[in-house]
Image (cartoon, rainbow, N blue to C red):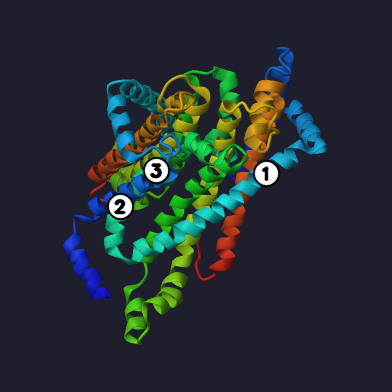
Amino acid sequence: MRALWRRLGWLLRGGEFVLALAIVVALWHGLSIWVGKATLVPPPLLVARAWIALLGDTLPEDALASLGHLAGGYGFGVTTGFLLAIACTRFATLEAIIDPLIELLRPIGAIAWIPLAILMFGIGTGVPIFLIFYASMFPVFINTLAGIKQVDRRLVQAAQMLGAPRRMIVTHVVLPAALPLVLSGARLSLGVAWASMVAAELTGSDAGLGWRIFWYQEFFAMDRVMAVILTIGVLGYSLDTLLRGLQRALTRWSPDSEAATR
Amino acid sequence: MTQTQRTLLPLLFFTALIAAWEIAMRGFGQAGLVPGPSGIVVAALRTLGDGSLWSATAGSLQRVAIGFAIGAGLGIPLGLVMGMLAPVNRALSPIVDSLRSIAPIAWIPMALLWLGIRGNAALFIVAYAAFFPFVVNTIQAVRLIDRNLTHAARALGAGNWLILRAVVLPSAIPSILTGARISMAFAWGSIIAAELAMGIKVTSGGSAAVGLGQLMVSTLYIRRDVDALVLYMIVIGLISLGIDLLMRRLQRTLTPWRQA
């Protein structure tokens, strides 16, 4: 049995993914034939055709709108979390106040803010940007705080002994040493930000990929709905891969870089 | 900073914050338009009294439990297979990764079509959200198993099935439980998202609010009760805290040899 697997594995090495993809697509196609309704389970070919049609239609503007929401909310959230954490390590009083506040707010997930955000900002770009901001702030804050706290004291002391000024210690010792944790916080943030973005666009926005899903559902164009859903997956995956590449490039020196970027 | 200062300072700050909030709200004559602490307490007493909060919370929690069980039932076996057989892992992991990148909530139109609004569409979303942390953590768990253990078992004549049962599963449990904790958190977030989306987008005539999300939507659009809205947010936060505590305790009781 093992020998068989090994031989099969040898044969399929590299081609496994293609094979698995083919099987999944075949199963999907079979399912849609078995169900017999193209609206209920749109066959893969139809979805592919819808996707190509969408490329020349609404998909670019929706993706741009979504990425715009993400850029605004994520950029703002990550910056806030990062700066807040740095301020907290500098001023102990601030940390004594902010840390419990964060721990109180964090369990109330971004999703729970949707109704209040709709009330505050109305249906529009405000809801997704606020939700993404809220969702992406916490992981970066928590990881930056932990990252700065676990910096080896001896490194800081060595720099001090060599006469480095405070600013230089921060930029050349503390921040680089904290970078791996900060970046993995940024990646965690991106994951929750992406999910929150879709939820916010579905419920409280008038643009973006999430909003477009329901737009096509109203026309019962389920092949287009599927095409948009798959686009959300591919875009989310690409963004994570991008950030993982950045993480790998910037923290190659770190001993746990290999584990973190897997 | 001393320990007493560390506990007193935030307490003082929060009391001042809540007092300032209440005074500002009343001072500007915004009671009922802007949520306020006293209004939240009143809303809590009212919704607990008439049972609407209880039934909605119970409905949401029930779906989370079922969806979580489905996610575990499908995710753990797949993770075991992918972790133990490298070719399967290489073949499936790009597919799993890209499906994982689809926010669960994006499936809601399809789920509504397939399963209807009677709670089952939300169930699909929850199961989808709970599934992936189980897969990822189980793969990780199997990968991290000490090769010496499996080799020793094989040298002693154990078959694949016995190795799975006696070596792989017990050593994988701590990491699977970590996956369970993440799954549970995802599941709780997704049920609220799914119920909100269903409540907002599906205008079904006279269907009673069946979960916290739908309750929030009807509070927002029909009753316009901002105090209750904030109360529900607090309830959501408390429940996710409770879930996390419960899962941590479970982890500690089930794997006492791990000091996590």
> Which residue is located at x 60 percent, y 52 percent?
B65
Contact check, label 2 and label 1, Cβ < 8 Å:
no
> Which residue is located at x 68 percent, y 42 percent?
B57
Residue at label 2?
A: A23
Please name the amino acid that badge 2 sits on.
Ile
x and y, in percent, of residue B48 in the image: 79, 38
Furthest residue in direction left, as rendered: A11
Please tell me which residue lies in front, B7 or B251. Answer: B251
Residue B59: mark: 1
Mark 2 or mark 3, which is nearer the start of the sequence? 2
Q: Chain of mark 2?
A: A
Against B119, is B90 above or below? Answer: below
x and y, in percent, of residue B237 in the image: 62, 40
Task: Report crowding for label 2: few under 14, some 14 to 19, many 20 or more residues within 10 A (C-alpha).
Answer: few
Give the distance between the C-alpha atoms of the residues marked 3 and 1, in whole angstroms: 32 Å
A29 with respect to B232 (left or right): left
> Which residue is located at x 43 percent, y 20 percent?
A207
User: Can residue A181 be seen from the camera position used here?
Assistant: no
Residue B97: mark: none
Q: Chain of mark 3?
A: A
Q: Report helix, strand or loop for mark 3.
A: helix
Residue A32: mark: 3
Against A149, is A49 above or below? Answer: above
Q: Quadrant of residue B225?
A: top right
Nearer to us of marks 3 and 1 is 3
Tags 3 and 2 both on a single chain = yes
Please name the amino acid that badge 3 sits on.
Ser
Q: Report helix, strand or loop for mark 1.
A: helix
x and y, in percent, of residue B4 in the image: 65, 45
Nearer to us of marks 2 and 1 is 2
